[in-house]
Image (cartoon, grey):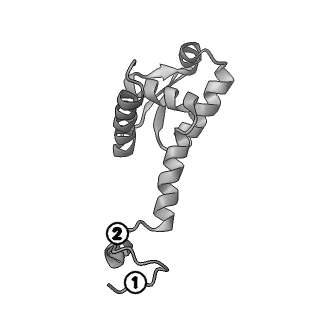
């Protein structure tokens, strides 16, 4: 094996290097996980994967203030994980209809099943 690493452990270095994600791709993925890296944001995202809701109702569900919920919604929205629609003065939020949001929801559900068996 031809390796330029300090230690040779029998790993196919060329294969690993050819499949390794680019640094900017890893930053993009890290940013997605950062969006749901806060427990409150994760719960809000989970709720919005199951229903469309307004800030006032989300605040009641979360036992949080409306401004605090709005702060989390802004971050989820800027990350493309949720979408919104206005009906009169009311704004309704739901999980974005994107492959990323669906995959992230599935991932969260599966991790919860493994890590939180009492749920």
User: Which of disc 2 and disc 1 is earlier in sequence?
Assistant: 1
- Circle 1 packing at 10 Å, graded few (<14), some (14-19), many (20+), is few
Q: Which residue is mark 1?
A: 3
Residue 9 occupies quadrant:
bottom left
What residue lies at 54% left-to-right and 19% top-to-bottom? 58
- Report whether 71 appears left or right of 19: right
**In the rendered image, is residue 85 in sight?**
no
Q: Which residue is mark 2?
A: 19
What residue lies at 46% left-to-right and 80% top-to-bottom? 5
- Report whether 68 appears left or right of 55: right
Residues 105 and 53: in front is 105
Q: Residue furthest bottom?
A: 2
Q: Secondary structure at mark 2?
A: helix
Q: How far apart are labels 1 and 2 at the CA level?
A: 16 Å
Residue 49 image offset from top left, x and y in percent: 40, 28
Q: Quadrant of the C terminus?
A: top left
Task: Tell me whether circle 1 and circle 2 mark residues in contact (CB < 8 Å).
Answer: no
Residues 91 and 87: in front is 91
Counting the numbered discs, the total is: 2
Residues 85 and 56: in front is 56
Name the disc covering residue 30, or none.
none
Residue 86 image offset from top left, x and y in percent: 51, 27
Residue 2 occupies quadrant:
bottom left
What residue lies at 34% left-to-right and 35% top-to-bottom? 106
- Circle 2 packing at 10 Å, graded few (<14), some (14-19), many (20+), is few
Residue 8 image offset from top left, x and y in percent: 41, 78
Q: Secondary structure at mark 1?
A: loop
**In the rendered image, is residue 46 in sight?**
yes
- Report whether 75 appears left or right of 20: right
Residue 52 image offset from top left, x and y in percent: 43, 22
What residue lies at 46% left-to-right and 35% top-to-bottom? 83
């Amino acid at each position: 094996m031809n390796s330029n690493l300090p230690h040779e452990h029998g790993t196919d270095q060329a294969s690993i290097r050819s499949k390794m994600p680019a640094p900017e791709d890893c930053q993009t993925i890290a940013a997605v996980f950062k969006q749901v890296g806060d427990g409150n944001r994760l719960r809000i995202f989970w709720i919005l994967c199951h229903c469309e809701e307004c800030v006032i109702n989300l605040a009641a569900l979360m036992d949080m203030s409306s401004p605090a919920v709005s702060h989390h919604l802004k971050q989820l929205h800027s990350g493309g994980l949720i979408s919104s629609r206005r009906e009169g003065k009311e704004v309704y939020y739901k999980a974005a209809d994107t492959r990323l949001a669906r995959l992230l929801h599935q991932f969260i559900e599966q991790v919860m099943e493994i890590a939180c068996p009492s749920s």
